[in-house]
Image: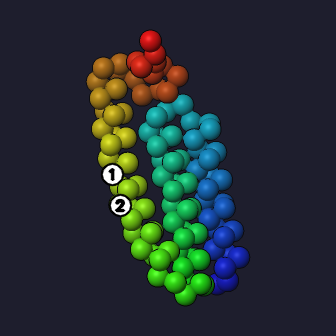
Amino acid sequence: MSLQAYLTLAAAVFCIGLFGVMTRRNTIGILLGIELMLNAVNINLVAFARFGGDVTGLIFTVFTICITVSEAALGLAIVILLFRVRRTVTADHLDLLRG
């Protein structure tokens, strides 16, 4: 596959994730959209590393995956806590931090 195919795939995955973030009202759906957007970035990093012949993109991708996993775990923990307090995970009803 060519570099353009990888970039097109990454752009499509990013757009799907952005659509999910913009249209979902459920916080878990929003987190999944953010994960898709970060995976699109990882696809770009790996594609440029492969076609550029540089290992830096691969190392940065592994680092990004570690950060993404911790972000997903922390986000899910926050969603579970909010569900226990508010009995809803709809983003419109979560105004807990407003003064």
Q: Position of residue 54 (x, y in %)?
A: 52, 84
Q: Are marks 1 and 2 in contact (CB under 8 Å)?
A: yes
* Mark 2, secondary structure of its residue: helix
Q: Residue at x 49, y 27 (%)?
A: 91
Q: Position of residue 79 (x, y in %)?
A: 36, 33
Q: CA distance from mark 1 to mark 2?
A: 6 Å
Mark 1, other Cα within 10 Å: few <14 / some 14–19 / many ≥20: few
Q: Is residue 33 above or below residue 9?
A: above
Q: Position of residue 8 (x, y in %)?
A: 69, 68
Q: Is residue 37 above or below residue 29?
A: below
Q: Nearer the viewer, residue 58 or 2?
A: 58
Amino acid type of the residue tagged 2 in the rendering? Cys
Q: Position of residue 19 (x, y in %)?
A: 64, 45
Q: Nearer the viewer, residue 61 or 56?
A: 56
Mark 2, other Cα within 10 Å: few <14 / some 14–19 / many ≥20: few
Q: Residue at x 35, y 19 (%)?
A: 86
Where residue 68 sits, quadrant-wise, is bottom left
Q: Is residue 29 left or right of residue 72?
A: right
Q: Quadrant of the N terminus?
A: bottom right
Which label belongs to residue 70? 1
Q: Is residue 87 above or below residue 24?
A: above
Q: Is residue 55 above or below residue 35?
A: below
Q: Residue furthest top?
A: 99
Q: Residue at x 46, y 43 (%)?
A: 31
Tag 2 residue: 66
Task: Report how many numbered discs are placed on residues in the image.
Answer: 2
Where residue 28 sits, quadrant-wise, is top left
Amino acid type of the residue tagged 1 in the rendering? Ser
